[in-house]
Image (cartoon, coloured by chain):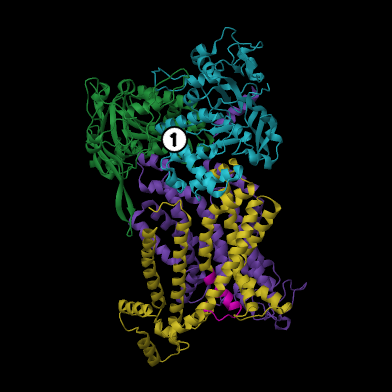
Amino acid sequence: MFVFTIRRILQTIPVLFGVSILVFLMMHLVPGDPAQVIAGEAASPQTIEQIRERLGLNDPLPMQYLNFIMNALQGDLGTSIRSGQPVSEEVFSRFWVTMELAFYSMILSAFIGLIAGIISAVRHYTIIDVVVMIIALFGLSMPNFWLGLMLMQFFSINLEILPVSGWGTPEQIILPVIALGTAGAAIIARMTRSSMLEVIGQDYIRTARAKGVKERFVIYKHALKNAMIPVVTVIGLEFGTLLTGAVLTETVFSINGLGRFVVESIRARDFPAVQGSVLVIALVFILVNLIVDLSYRFLNKRIDLN
Amino acid sequence: MLAESTVQESMTKPSNPHIENAKNIFKRLKKNKAAMVGGFLILLFILTAFIGPFLVPYGAGEQNLVNKLQGPSAEHWFGTDHLGRDIFSRIIHGMSITLYIGFFSVFIAAIFGVVIGIVSGYYGGKIDTLLMRLMDVLLAFPGILLALGVVTILRPNLNNVILAVAVFSVPAFARIVRGSTLAVKELEYIDAVRALGAGDVRIIFRHILPNVFSPIIVQATLRIATAILTAAGLSFLGLGAQPPTPEWGAMLSDGRNYIFDAGHVALFPGLAIVVVVLAFNIFGDGLRDALDPKMKS
Amino acid sequence: MTTKLLEVNNLKQYFPIKGGVFGRTVNHVKAVDDVSFYVNEGETLSIVGESGCGKSTTGRAVLRLDEPTEGDIQFNGENLLDLNKNDMRKKRKDMQIIFQDPYASINPRQTVRQVLEEAMAIQDVVPKADRVDKMMELLDTVGLGSHQLDRFPHEFSGGQRQRVGIARALAVDPKFIICDESVSALDVSIQAQVLNLLKNLQEQYNLTYLFIAHDLGVVRHISDRVAVMYLGRVVEIGEKEEIFDNPKHPYTKSLLSAIPVPDPSHKQERIVLKGDVPSPIDPPPGCRFHTRCPFATEKCRDETPELRKTETMTGTHEAACHYMEDIEAGRHKAAY
Amino acid sequence: MTNDADVLQIDNLQTSFFIDGSEIKAVDGVSLNIPKGKTVGIVGESGSGKSITSMSVMRLIRNPGRIKGGSIHFNGEDLLQKTEKNMQNIRGNKISMIFQEPMTSLNPVYTVGQQISEVLQIHQNLSKKEALSKSVEMLELVGIPSPNDRVKQYPHELSGGMRQRVMIAIALACNPELLIADEPTTALDVTIQAQILELMNGLRKELGMSVILITHDLGVVAETCDYVAVMYAGQIVEYADVHTLFNNPKHPYTVGLMQSLPRHDMDQEELNVIEGNVPKPGEMPEGCRFAPRCPFASDICTRELPDLMETEDGNQVRCWVYSEKWDGDPEVNVKDDYKTARSQ
């Protein structure tokens, strides 16, 4: 397990390298002169040259990448063109808002998804199963930004019981979390159900029944523990999806988080800000995947570590 | 005597392989009522995309500022927007855009994904490691983020949205196809044709590709649903199709500004997205059950 | 005068195990470790042994379905391992294989017609115009009807599929066929049909078989000579009668005695071996059987026995045990 | 037929599967008694219904399968009339079962000790600690070396033979009166099979239980069983004590099966095959189910299904040859004439 952990951590290095290159190249893949793009069509040559100087665009490309990486490693993600503030500060001040949003949404998805999935599997082919699965299909098919708008309209505008926007108070948290967590709950419910059904068909479940184990324990002791192994992975991966789903939800509910920051920076073509925040989100995602993968290995004792 | 001869006849009659297989799949598909509903809806949507714009009462950009932000009525079934445009007509006009984005982006993604997946799975070794690390890098930008990156680089417009969504779908195809290729490669019939002296090209095209086709089709159908959602999201953020295009995400974005006075402006384009995405999801689920009962998402 | 069609010398097949922090090769599965044997033209040599003994790996290595680690494989006087990819491809016309699993060994999306057509097309053995006639002939040979030509594998039973697999192998007119557990997955009544078919085909076309199996009843029925493998090594080889009626190696003896006899009045002394087969990753030193052998001594652990002949063995019979003579003379007793 | 000396009496058992609106009769009218302390073998090829019979005894038939009729008396009480709760008290306690696939029959996420303990905790109300120490004893009983360490291991750490020993330990933990072994050695190599058969024979004598052994291997039957039932296409076609069956097989299927078996202990010329294939479920022939493959089949065989009838040697045979209604060659001797009849 220890060797596996080390190896798995080492494996993320090329991925990190690739991600950093892609993020770095983002600015350079833009057709035309990045400095011109940032400054706008009407900018004077002097302004463009200034920007070029400030971003180090006159250096050779490998040199620029090296600087980018060295700075990033020291926590320096450059300066936002829009605000003139260091990007790292801008990102960090919003980071926890997005993490909170994603985290609460994950709790909600996992809770509802697991319960719905288990009920559906246990009541396989009954009307309950059908209803739960239809709801899940809807949950999967709804754009979270539209769901957010509809919730807002109903609860905040028509009923006036919950606030329209912002983040921090418990009331402010409810709607964005539901809007963001619904799709995840649907995915987890479907996954739990199919995983449970697959496990229930296994030989060792037949063994448990032949031992005289009560059906309730066959399900909750023998089947569930095995069925959870792939589901845990899905829940973990869902966190990444939630992180980016926040881009839309934060926009809808005017939450001052990292997601909305990315969108606004893109609109303003504030490249250092986009690069910085995309890099941070990707890093968090890679980290979460790593943790999920390790815990999957830990949970699944059947997997030969070789 | 009579019975015997009919049995003989039915036994000697050659049957066309492709029809035979398609027949079986269709038989299983037909049993899945939800899938049939999904498939029917998709056909209906395609039909609407082609002839709908000629049947609706208003043009996509036809403004009538006097009648702006009106609720649903006999005249305007889904009401009007802030420029007095008929929302129902705009949704019908937007159908072709939505389907175009969905089908085309997934088509591009599938082609790249299948090639990468088969090469990776069949040859293994260094090329496999390299390609899969590349996919890992793409997957490290979760969800819509990768599409956002592409749109950032390439300016927001419809075609770039397709490209963005395609790039974001490639790893999913590559991984599924690689997995299936690895599984099929291990089967004895591959060894049997190798033992006959078949080369790589024949093995890949005759024996692996047809047998990984089912998961590709299923994945493609489900991916269309995701692609439509992602594209709508990009447009909603103002980073996709630009107004006045009657793209549903962009219409929703407009509607957001009038949510306090006229909720219907946001309601109906969203419902349209839900219905279309739902149809693809249902159909994809049904296809999966029919093509390969053992395959799980 | 018998001629050797296939001669395998010092064949080794090691599969690397990746591990450690950097995923380097840390060890090998020594699936086949220094195996030599030959097959005469027109005869059947069987390789028997329990799972993991390397019998199937040997077959695959002979056909270069997996590239062998070491050794040489003379087929018709030519070393197969010297051939380049293209020449090997042509050579495959002469050497075919029939697999175990009738459900996995035919492409589920091809009809029998397509399966056979493809085989002939790859090696271009029959002119296009004559292929349909040849297919009909093949189906007739393996006991299928011509009306079954356009059927898919799923429309056949396991035994019928195995017949399709045999027809595919015959389609290129091979000299030599490897039967890799070809009847193991079939029910007894069907197994007998396929065994009889294989025997008849051998006479009809003067085929040479390398027959890989774990069922000793089947092996006795079909073989001329038998090789017994244990943990990657041949421990005993010789004429069928010698192996079954005059076994010398303790492993062969215990293997034969372990098989239940379908006769309730039959009582025989059974040698029940202790424990499991050790891992081929770190096989025991010396004689690989010494960890389970009731006769094992210090010497067995230190020295690897070579295949050799004793006075009481006839024909080409050889076995690899230090104590064959002593056990036979009763000088060396079992420890349990 | 009721007899106090029988631990289990299966009478006219019918189990069917209902798939796509059609009924597949997997077990069609099976009657079988298991005498106390004896081993009864059920032999047959795949699809003969032998495993479904055993699963029916355990009442473990799941949807879309259903036990349609008949009775299964265990110590005088009909198992088919029992509630599910009562059945749970019997399973693993009075009647135990071991399965063919040792690799997949143990739950991968629990230790061997936990899995043996569970059955003791359910049926004998032992505490966790008591159950665990009893588990160690059980592992010792089934011949697993260093049981104190093994008890803490997970299934994937054990070989196939070891896992089958663990399955046996679970099955025997509560001292059952009846053990159903469904192809217990089929997945194992012969030397390991020999170990397991030896173990099972020894334990049966030691514990005095009755055994139903389901197998396709006539060698295993000859070696371990007292009585044998041969099944074909959902029905018992022949039943006899093991010596009678092997010395004087009466049913053409039994004879064909024995003569088509390649032997390792004697030389045979050509194998006496049974032509054709097992009928597909749902496509059962009218009359005797073996008639289409039977070299002796005459008119009546294709019209009417024979009942099991007693012969003078004590076999029960489902074959018209032994009936007064037989309309074929009156001189026929199935065992001796099989080969000549087949080649005609």
Q: Position of residue B137 (x, y in %)?
A: 41, 66
Asked where in the image residue B221 lies, by quadrant, the reply is bottom right
Whether residue B206 is visible here, answered yes or no, is: no
Chain identity for the colour green used in the image: C
Image quarter in which the N terminus of chain C is found: top left
Of residues D113 and A162, the one nearer the viewer is D113
Chain B colour as displayed? purple
Output the letter for the chain in yellow. Answer: A
Image vertical order of residue C247 relative to residue D122, above or below: above
> Can the viewer see residue C22 in this picture?
yes
As drawn, is B258 to the left or to the right of B12? right
Which residue sits at x=61%, y=81%?
A166
The colour applied to the residues of chain D in this rendering is cyan
Tell me the crowding category of disc 1: few under 14, some 14 to 19, or many 20 or more residues within 10 angstroms, Cα based: some
Q: Quadrant of the C terminus of chain C?
A: top left
| Main secondary-structure element of the magenta-colored stretch | helix
